[in-house]
Image: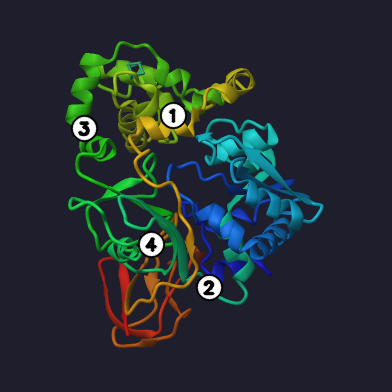
Amino acid sequence: MTIQDIFEAGVVGAGGAGFPTHVKLSGKADTLLINAAECEPLLHKDKEVLREYLDAVIEGMALGMGLTGAERAVVGVKDKYRDVIELLRAKLPSNMEVAELRDAYPAGDEFILVYDVLNRAIPPGGIPLHVGAVVMNVETAVNVAAAKIRPVTEKFLSVAGAVAEPATLRVPLGVTMAECVAAAGGPTVPDANYIVGGVMMGYLEDDRDALVDKTTGGIIVLPDDHVIVRRRRQDWKQIGRIGRAACDQCSFCTELCPRWLLGHPIEPHRAMRSLGFNRIGEANVIGTQFCCECNLCSLYSCPEDLDPKNVCTQNKRRLAAEKRRCENPPFNPRRPELHLANRKAPMARLMTKLGLRQFRNVGPLQATLLPAAKVGIKLKQHLGAPCEATVAVGQSVAKGQVVGRPPMADGKPALGAPVHASIDGVVTAIADGAVWIGK
Ligand code: SF4
Ligand code: SF4
């Protein structure tokens, strides 16, 4: 297996970020971490994939170790999944091991995972490679193992919340979210809203026909009056006005912020304070560029139910637009040692706070591929440049055939990965950022 094979197969991070895997595995590290922490409430796909496709995960880990030079690999998984942990312990070779993680949020954030498993704090603005680690999602490892045989044409995702049969599905890329929800028994509420990716870090998708891509890890269905939906529908003016009037600067948001606890210079209470200034983005909130948008401050920490996360992201976007960056950010690597372990949000408490205890917290795998007569293959399913279509309307395509490639820049492909047909059929349109294929 080569880096080129992984590129050609279109493998990108399946955990949500979509970072091209061939780039990630081009780095050198002493440890490969497999991220099965899956700390978003109600999501189950990583644990289900681990249980069902463990041999492929192990093969992907071995390949990842070979490419990065890592001598050790560790699978990070929640300690509550005893059956999966026993399976792993029985099958993993001597250079691979399991790290049991507390059932708390956040756990799957790369920075937190690297600290919890390796006791290494990544500096602000850094990446796991800076501390000798490469992190790969479970499903990504399966795709790496298969890269020589087949490209990425399928996705695993959990469908949960207000649906009749919560499940983890195996679907062709490019099916609609409505088809996935129907496959999970359909909504149990008339006013179904789709939260894509998870209730903490995901987004509200109003288009039921939005397409599943390589980064879609889950769809949570919730009614209009659910707190998560109401919070997502608040507009920025309302958030700013209420925040300015009601924030009492208690600083709980900062004291529980996972990135502040890692020693990074992000202090959401200062961003909240800046709402009272004439212009946000003043010097003392430049640290907002280190916010990972985990939403813990807004959905868990703040006793007033304010929205420091959105205030931080507004600041962050303004700073980025103005090309202002915090050079040489201060870093306190002693802070995680002092505080991180005992300040995470226990999952049971988080579920209660988010009003999710009423939903069944299960996601059994439906391993049979969901049938599809029509798909839309998005040309951008990864971090980097959108692909350019390599097929024409009316052309017959076979499952696995390349239908889009990253554009060339300076004689080599721009950051990205090719995309492939997920069914046999005919190209019916190239529109709205996708190649549409029908049978
Ligand atoms: S926790 Fe809430 S009230 Fe306290 S400082 Fe943060 S935003 Fe303000
Ligand atoms: S969303 Fe809030 S808690 Fe999370 S990193 Fe940003 S400021 Fe910290």
Front tag of 1 and 3: 1
| Residue bearing mark 4 | 380
Distance between mark 1 and mark 3 Cα atoms: 28 Å
Tell me which amino acid carries mark 1: Arg
Q: In which quarter of the image is ligand 1?
A: top left
Q: Please tell me in which quadrant of the rendered image residue 56 appears.
A: bottom right
Tag 3–tag 2 contact (CB < 8 Å): no
Q: Could you say which disc has been placed on residue 236 in the image? A: 3
Q: Are marks 1 and 3 in contact (CB under 8 Å)?
A: no
Q: Which residue has dot 2 on it? A: 151
- Locate residue 146, reporting x and y percent: 61, 70
Question: Where is mark 1, residue-wise?
Answer: 349
Which element carries disc 3, helix, strand or loop?
Answer: helix
Q: Residues within 10 Å of mark 1 (few under 14, many from 20)?
A: few
Dot 3 or dot 2, earlier in sequence: 2
Q: Distance between the residues labelled 4 and 3?
A: 27 Å
Q: In this view, does 394 lie above or below 384?
A: below
Residue closest to the eye, 24 or 376: 376
